[in-house]
């Protein structure tokens, strides 16, 4: 799962949930893919070596290679999202670091915090939101559908555990 729970050693009874998108193409895979694409695109051009046709085809092959390079690099930048939910007895905070630098922050009292799973009607199926202090925010929208369902269940359990500790 592209999320994990951890305890904050500096603050007792504080749980931190960290979420990130899938990173399915590591740098070595990117390099291998680009090299393979370039070689496979260049193989048909071997028959045109020494002709003017090669100079007509070469810009298109290079443009296709540059386009794929740009698309994969852009996708890599767009996946640089990090969400962090901190649940403590007195505060629940959600921070999101976006790829283009406009970070977002939200906080509420965990007693009033509610977790919702919207099966339809959201930008993605099984959309998970947190609601508190009159505001509703999304969490984990970049996760797969099954992961969002599991996240919803994990959040419900974590809040129940936190509220039970507070009530004791």
Image (cartoon, rainbow, N blue to C red):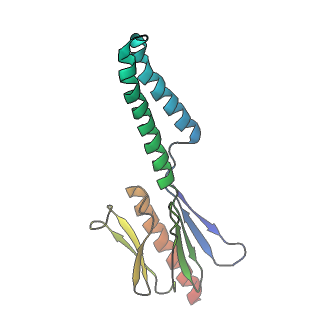
Quadrant of the image containing the C terminus: bottom right
Q: Residue furthest bottom?
A: 167
- Spot occupied by residue 8 in the image (x, y as percentages of width and height): 67, 72
Residue closest to the eye, 149 or 46: 46
**Position of residue 91 in the picture relative to residue 145 (left or right):** right
- Spot occupied by residue 139 in the image (x, y as percentages of width and height): 45, 68
Q: Residue at x 40, y 17 (%)?
A: 45
Q: Residue furthest front?
A: 52
Residue closest to the eye, 27 or 22: 27
Q: Is residue 155 above or below residue 30?
A: below
Q: How many marks?
A: 0
Q: Is residue 111 above or below residue 7?
A: below
Quarter assignment of residue 90: bottom right
- Spot occupied by residue 155 in the image (x, y as percentages of width and height): 48, 71
**Position of residue 138 in the picture relative to residue 168 (left or right):** left
Residue closest to the eye, 43 or 116: 43
Q: Is residue 53 above or below residue 13?
A: above
Quarter assignment of residue 143: bottom left
Q: Residue furthest right?
A: 10
- Spot occupied by residue 63 in the image (x, y as percentages of width and height): 40, 34
Q: Is residue 114 above or below residue 96?
A: below
Q: Residue at x 52, y 56 (%)?
A: 80
């Amino acid at each position: 799962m592209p999320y994990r729970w951890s305890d904050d050693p500096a603050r007792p009874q504080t749980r931190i949930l960290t979420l990130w998108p899938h990173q399915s193409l590591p740098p070595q895979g990117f390099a291998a893919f680009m090299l393979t694409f370039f070689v496979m695109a260049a193989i048909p051009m071997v028959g045109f070596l020494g002709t003017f046709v090669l100079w007509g085809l070469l810009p298109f092959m290079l443009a296709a290679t540059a386009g794929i390079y740009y698309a994969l690099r852009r996708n890599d930048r767009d996946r640089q999202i990090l969400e962090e939910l901190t649940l403590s007895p007195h505060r629940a905070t959600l921070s999101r670091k976006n790829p283009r630098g406009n970070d977002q922050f939200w906080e509420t009292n965990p007693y009033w915090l509610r977790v919702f799973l919207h099966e339809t009607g959201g930008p993605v199926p099984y959309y998970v939101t947190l609601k508190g202090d009159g505001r509703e925010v999304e969490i984990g929208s970049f996760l797969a559908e099954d992961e969002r369902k599991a996240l919803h269940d994990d959040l419900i359990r974590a809040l129940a555990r936190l509220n039970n500790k507070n009530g004791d």
